[in-house]
Amino acid sequence: MQRSVSLVTVTAILTALAATVPAAQAADGPRTAPRPAAAGPSTLTSQDIATAGTGSPYYRIPALTRTTKGTLLAAYDARPTLGDLPGNLGVVLRRSTDGGTTWQAQQVVRKDAAPQGYGDPSLLVDRETGRVFVFYAASVNQGFFGSATGNDENDPDVLQADYSYSDDDGLTWTHRRITAQIKDPAWAGMFAASGEGIQLRHGPHKGRLIQQYAIRRDGANHAVSAYSDDHGATWRMGTPVGPGGDENKTVELSDGRVMLNNRSAPYRTVAHSTDGGVTYTPFRQDTELPDPANNGSIARLAPGVDATHPRSSWLLFSNTATTGGRSNLTVRLSCDNGENWPVRKTVEAGSAAYSTLTPLDDGTLPNSRVGLLWERADYRHITYSSFDLKWLGGVCAPVTLTPPAALPAGKTTEVTVRVVSQNDVPLPAGEVSLALPAGWSAPAVAVPALRPGQGADVTIPVTVPAGTGAGAVKATAAYQVRGDQHSYGDATLTVTAP
């Protein structure tokens, strides 16, 4: 639920919500059809599927999933202003039955007359029954911060927990309210964290459906999992983790734990559950994931494979990878359940906001593809992109820099870099280079061939120019192998006077 954008008053009302959304015609560049960002088999393609002013004054808050029949569903808010609930918002959706190449006309999932509003969708597919859920918040008088405590489902001052479900692959929808089931009466505001929920595929809680919520308790925000063990017939709420919770996502790890990844500045925070999302460890920062407090996404590339499969611990993550404004939309890959994030690629260097990603196949193909739905160009577009692993261009080999305590200005000092192969096949010889400030020098250094699980330490002589002021300097090590595959590691170097 966006909270940092000021309300923009417009006189237009929400009309023609079910109309087909044509391509963008704005000065920021139309994307009328899937357009590759790179030639050849290694591609990222993008197209706008909703544009502000066409069918609705504004669109926000993307959600994306792939059904058991292979249909892509993209849901998002249609808004009269950029403001959150309360307001006369509606949840709309587009379907693609050809893998995202074309999209059917926009349809309404839930929309009623003012002052009622529905917003912040999150899609969730039950892989055992085929049922599709879309969770969202429902309001009359109050939004997240103004919501009353209590769980009376008829109280107009309580922000309600609603969802709609479809048994025909997203063509028609039935609505339910579960506020009384999942909301502790002591809590105030509560809303479903937008994007995509998960279903556990393995272990003692196999089949469990999990949808994330942000809740307000005693004046502070927390994250919490709503879960169902009976295919959505009933829902229960776990124990909140916080304070410091916000929009958050979960992913099932190969070791059976559930990881919670939470919106937070200047870095994402994470927590883990060993009981299927009921309770979590306290939050800790993941300093490899910078964040400006923006909604992001995390997913397991191959969620259906057993723990013995080489890709069982591969995770994908997307967010605006900055600590300031919302820009630099980046996709990352971890090959060790999120312990390290050595692979990263920028989707959009400019303005971007919320994003959600979902695998487009079972994740085991040599060049599996992933779908990404995101907000582009100052919220003017909801854009669908897809990319393959070759475009991501990474190699599963975390890079760690171990700098000395200090690097004297005007001197040459050795910095140790360690590369560890997490690949299931041998890696040929490669090299490591350092990205440093202008005027510094550091040669690229060879890294020997590595067997699966093998690591190597190399030293790089770093020369700091004379006259460099004392202080902290960021350095990035890039490991390159097979010509165009990379992994990265960051560290802070401390410069001292000679």
Image (spheres, rainbow, N blue to C red):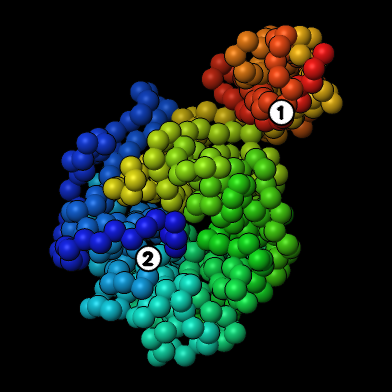
| Front-lying residue, 138 or 474 | 474
Q: Residue at x 71, y 28 (%)?
A: 472
To which residue does mark 1 refer?
A: 472
Q: Position of residue 329 (x, y in %)?
A: 46, 40
Locate the N terminus and report the quarter of the image it occupies. bottom left
Q: What amino acid type is highlighted by mark number 2? A: Asp
* Gap between marks 1 and 2 measured at Cα: 40 Å
Q: Residue at x 66, y 12 (%)?
A: 440
Q: Residue at x 84, y 26 (%)?
A: 405
Q: Position of residue 13 (x, y in %)?
A: 18, 66
Helix, strand or loop at label 1? It is strand
* Res 274 visible: yes
| Front-lying residue, 459 or 132 | 459
Q: What amino acid type is highlighted by mark number 1? A: Ala
In this picture, residue 283 sits left or right of residue 415: left
Give the mark nearer the N terminus: 1 vs 2.
2
Helix, strand or loop at label 2? It is loop
Pointer 2: residues within 10 angstroms few (<14), some, or many (20+)?
many
* Res 163 visible: no
To which residue does mark 2 refer?
A: 84
- Rendering quarter of residue 223: bottom right
In this picture, residue 43 sits left or right of residue 275: left
- Closer to the eye: label 1 or 2: 1
Locate the C terminus and report the quarter of the image it occupies. top right
In the rendered view, tell whether residue 491 sits above or below residue 268: above
In the rendered view, tell whether residue 189 sits above or below residue 18: below
| Front-lying residue, 239 or 216 | 216
